[in-house]
Image (spheres, rainbow, N blue to C red):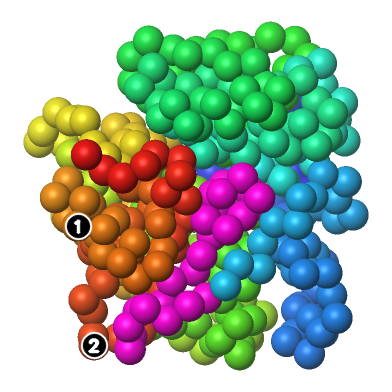
């Protein structure tokens, strides 16, 4: 039986509760969960062609809210760089991997309402999966969120709350609503079920590469949900003897909003009190997170993998989006950050996620 566990002070809570954070330190939960069994490549033949094919590794089974998420293609871009096309998900972003877990958990708990906060993609994913589950949903977004993303949220029937200010103001508004009785907070940051959904990104990669992983995995990092999910999967695959070497995690941030990169290169365990520059507007809205709640976990995961943090400029993002489009991939501005950072690597194999469709933001101005 899985239980919530606070990584800071060891506090526990039942996953049947609507408690969305540690009641002692108010930090995010981890999940104390032991996989049901060891997955082998041979055992996957003939299974459902979605992320639920890795059921032994997941904390939920027999989903009722699936939209067929997962199993996105892995396509070579150069001799050493490949792309995983997560913009081909049902709501056009990788956030479906975690949102289906949150919605299915919420469905089992039967709350009066679901709330979420997002810069756009997580909100659209939660809205879609709550619609599938028949759950009333409210999504909080910053006032500068892409109109195409807010349109998608409304289309799925969710109530939209547009919050004046930045991403942090939006998170605070959602957390205040989450404290209301009968509310399930479908937080892609605080609820660890989301991370156990995103870890399937690496399980798919492992399967498609015939039981191995590349030398490095690059991921865009704001709140770190894809990176931490990747770290979970890598740890599980290694512990089960399914990989011999762990790939380096290459975390990519926009130079304009790069608190984790600043902390990493300063050698600190957590965010700097003064990261050296104020957050500025960025085309990479999906990773424009000035104070990610799981900062310590993100920094630890990158260091333990032998990886690093890279930053990209706004001009690099613009050029990378056009370059990918010229190769046939129309990707949103956040989703091109990793290609901007490592697309010219030739000394080792690396996979980058193309994690949101270009239709969500349009071409960068």
Q: Is residue 83 magenta?
A: yes
Q: Quadrant of residue 209?
A: bottom right
Q: Is residue 272 a member of the stretch shown in magenta?
A: no
Label 1 secondary element: helix
256 with respect to 303 (left or right): left
Could you say where residue 272 lies in the image, as x and y percent from the top left? 20, 37
Packing grade of label 2 (10 A; few <14, some 14-19, many >=20) is: few
The residue singled out by tag 1 in the image is 319
Please, what secondary structure does the residue beneath circle 2 have?
A: loop
Q: Which is nearer the N-term, disc 2 or disc 1?
A: 1
Over which residues does the magenta segment extend?
74-98
Circles 2 and 1, Cβ within 8 Å, touching? The answer is no
List x then y, in percent, for residue 215: 38, 82
- Residue assigned mark 2: 347
- The residue shown at (41%, 77%) is 82
Which of these two is toward me, 250 or 99?
A: 99
Examine the rendered structure and indicate whether residue 98 appears above or below residue 188: below
Q: Residue at x 42, y 49 (%)?
A: 358
Residues 252 and 264: in front is: 252
Q: Quadrant of the C terminus?
A: top left
Which residue does the image show at 67% across and 22% down from the upper left? Answer: 158
Q: What is the count of numbered marks?
A: 2
Question: Which image quadrant is residue 188 in?
Answer: top right
User: Quick check: 302 above or below 120?
Assistant: below
**Residue 41 point in image, percent of width and height:** 73, 87
- Left or right, 357 with respect to 243, comes to left
Residue sitting at the far left: 276
How far is mark 2 from mark 1, CA to CA? 22 Å
> Viewer-nearest of labels 2 and 1?
1
Residue 176 visible in image: yes
């Amino acid at each position: 039986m899985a239980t919530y566990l606070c990584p800071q002070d060891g506090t526990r809570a039942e996953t049947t509760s609507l408690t969305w954070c540690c009641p002692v330190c108010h930090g995010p939960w981890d999940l104390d969960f032991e996989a049901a069994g060891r997955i082998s490549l041979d055992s996957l033949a003939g299974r459902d062609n979605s992320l639920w094919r890795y059921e032994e590794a997941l904390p939920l089974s027999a989903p009722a809210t699936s939209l067929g998420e997962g199993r996105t293609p892995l396509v070579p871009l150069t001799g050493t760089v490949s792309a995983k096309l997560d913009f081909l998900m049902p709501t056009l972003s990788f956030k479906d991997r975690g949102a289906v877990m949150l919605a299915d958990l919420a469905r089992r708990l039967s709350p009066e309402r679901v709330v979420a906060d997002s810069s756009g993609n997580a909100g659209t994913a939660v809205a879609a999966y709550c619609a599938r589950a028949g759950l009333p949903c409210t999504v909080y977004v910053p006032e500068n969120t892409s109109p195409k993303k807010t349109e998608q949220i409304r289309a799925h029937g969710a109530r939209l709350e547009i919050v004046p200010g930045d991403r942090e103001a939006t998170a605070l508004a959602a957390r205040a609503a989450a404290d209301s009785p009968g509310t399930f907070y479908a937080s892609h940051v605080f609820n660890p079920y989301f991370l156990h959904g995103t870890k399937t990104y690496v399980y798919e990669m492992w399967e498609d590469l015939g039981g191995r992983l590349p030398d490095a995995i690059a991921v865009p990092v704001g709140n770190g949900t894809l990176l931490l999910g990747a770290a979970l999967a890598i740890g599980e695959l290694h512990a089960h003897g399914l990989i011999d070497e762990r790939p380096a995690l290459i975390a990519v941030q926009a130079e304009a909003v790069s608190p984790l990169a600043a902390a990493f290169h300063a050698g600190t365990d957590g965010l700097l009190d003064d990261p050296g520059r104020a957050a500025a507007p960025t085309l990479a809205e999906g990773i424009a997170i000035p104070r990610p709640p799981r900062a310590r976990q993100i920094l630890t995961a990158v260091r333990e993998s032998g990886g690093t943090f890279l930053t990209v400029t706004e001009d690099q993002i613009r050029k990378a989006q056009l370059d990918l489009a010229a190769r046939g991939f129309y990707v949103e501005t956040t989703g091109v950050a990793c290609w901007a950072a490592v697309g010219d690597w030739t000394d080792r194999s690396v996979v980058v996620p193309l994690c949101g469709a270009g239709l969500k933001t349009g071409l960068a101005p």
